Image (cartoon, helix red, strand yellow):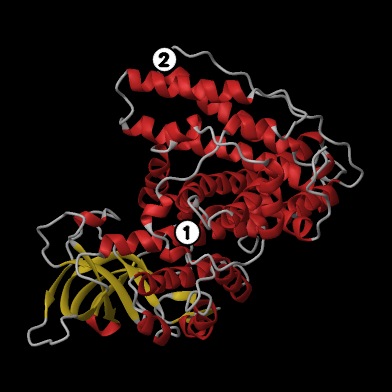
Amino acid sequence: MYREDPEYGRIVDFDWLRTIHRRVADNFHPRFNMLGAVRTCIELTTSEPSVNIAIGASLLAYTLLIASDEDELAESLKDAIFTLAWTEEHCGSDLLSLRTHATPIAGDETGRQYHLRGSKWIINNSIHADYHIVLAKLDPTQDGPRSLSFFLVPHSSTKNWQRMDTHVLRNMVLAAYEIDGPGRLLGKVGHGLSIVQRMATASRYLCSYMGVVWMRQSLPAAIEHLARKHIFGAHPLEFGNVFRQMYVLVQKAALLDYLFHRSVAFNDGSFLQFLGTMLKSWLLLRTNEVMIETLLVTGSKGFVSSSPIGRNAIDSLVLPVFDGHYTVNTNMSAKHLKRYLSAARRVDLRERLRILDERLYYETYHEEIHAHPRDIRKPDFFDFADYLQQFQLPLELDARRLVATAQQVQEAIIDRGQQNDPEHRYKAGDLLHWLESILVAAELSAHLGGDDYVNAVAIQYNGTVELLNQIIAESALPVDFMTPARFLPLPRVADPQAYLLRLLDVERRVLAKESSVSLN
């Protein structure tokens, strides 16, 4: 997976990457199997972060061929390495401000051959790629939604590569470079932004899975270390405070794992974009937090470079925050808050859990990349409080009051004319994601039965209450504060390591049908 390069040192072995690229790409074309693609990628790369991101970047660029309806190219170029070339130094990933431009080549009867000039910045794989999927303008003075087009540019049209050293994923090869040469138009002129949107709908899930996988590596390694290490004559995992911290982290990690796969299970309809934006922002920030807190609890072991505890915590920071993608996705969710809180449609809990029991952790062909915008812009939300009350949780939480308080907060912000303020838009999207996470935690608890994950509901409920109270306090809103819920007592267990690892292994438990999906 890695090789020693005379110029760049230890880097990803791109020749080896080409040998597995087709096996992953086969999951994307001719049928689009998103979960199958990421699973194949993880299986072949053994979850090495630098390798994951290198092949992930190439495959995201490859999916633009599919999103552009370039099926013949998509089939013929499965063995190639690609770059996703849209970021420029002066504007980051603000696509409408880029300066790279394309000029039609005289005498081209196809109308698809262009000469491209410009520069790209902090692009992965670019020095070693076979092709660059370049976003450019025909008229660099334009900045409207129809100003952008995509081009397939061979490596021979790029030059002056300069590797950029980074703090994370140091075995990748990120570079700045210039483009000056021919390229082929992908899709239609001026449809670059719509192609990005089609690709992004699916890519949110692909990126998010990396965070979940790295978290699933980090927690077991930490638990094993804390169960073997000796401090003051005992294993740290036997200390009450350490067990409590790891218990909370395991509850959070189990929820995030379940949340990702639940999002895949329900993404065959109107919830595709909504769940994707939650994954690409809320979920990735939460996986960051879990891994960083795990590193802090674990201590010195996490600083060993070979350990996934610290390595994954640091490398995962690149997933949600690159040029503010997490903010963009959170703001996309903000527009749904009013509909989410006022939805009156009633859903049956047993039917939802039956669907989850059939779909969770199974690969499906939802053809997400071909979803039409009109079908995913307005998710079919349902009555939040009614659904939560159907679980009959053994916790003191008031679903109706939670919804009412969120509505009061929203109305108070609107009354002040601050609903379009960037800070409040972000908080609205974040609040919506937190509310949805409560439902996910309740589904997890009901799906696997017993009291194992009831405290996951309390954790998500309290996180939502904390955010609501923060908004009320910081904006001095005339809304009453809410009270957090109490946990169920933490269990007393003879073998903390085995108990925590069992809680963490949600996939095995779901697939093994360890517990019934029925309610009392």
Snapshot quadrant of residue 336: top left
With 81 as the anchor, is 114 left or right in this view?
Answer: left
Snapshot quadrant of residue 64: bottom left
Q: Nearer the viewer, residue 215 or 279?
A: 279
Answer with mark 1 or mark 2, whichever residue precedes in sequence. 1
- SS state under label 2: loop
Q: Nearer the viewer, residue 167 or 511?
A: 511
Q: Which mark is residue 408?
A: none
Q: Residue at x 32, y 18 (%)?
A: 416
User: Can you give x and y, in whole percent of width and height, for residue 445 in the image?
Assistant: 74, 42
Q: Considering the image in quadrants, where does the C terminus appear?
A: top right
Whether residue 229 is visible, yes or no, is no
User: Can you give x and y, in whole percent of width and height, for residue 333 in the image?
Assistant: 42, 42
- SS state under label 1: loop
The amino acid at mark 2 is: Ala
User: Can you give x and y, in whole percent of width and height, for residue 230 in the image?
Assistant: 83, 48
Q: Considering the image in quadrants, where does the N terminus appear?
A: bottom right
Q: Residue at x 67, y 53 (%)?
A: 356
Direction right: furthest residue: 494
Residue 292 to residue 8: above or below? above
Q: Identify the residue under disc 1.
A: 168
Whether residue 477 is visible, yes or no, is yes
Between the residue at mark 1 and the residue at mark 2, the CA separation in whole angstroms equals: 39 Å
With 505 as the anchor, is 460 left or right in this view?
Answer: left
Q: Nearer the viewer, mark 1 or mark 2?
A: 2
User: Is the C-beta separation of discs 1 and 2 under 8 Å?
Assistant: no
The amino acid at mark 1 is: Val
Q: Identify the residue under disc 2.
A: 476
Q: Residue at x 53, y 21 (%)?
A: 404
Direction left: furthest residue: 106
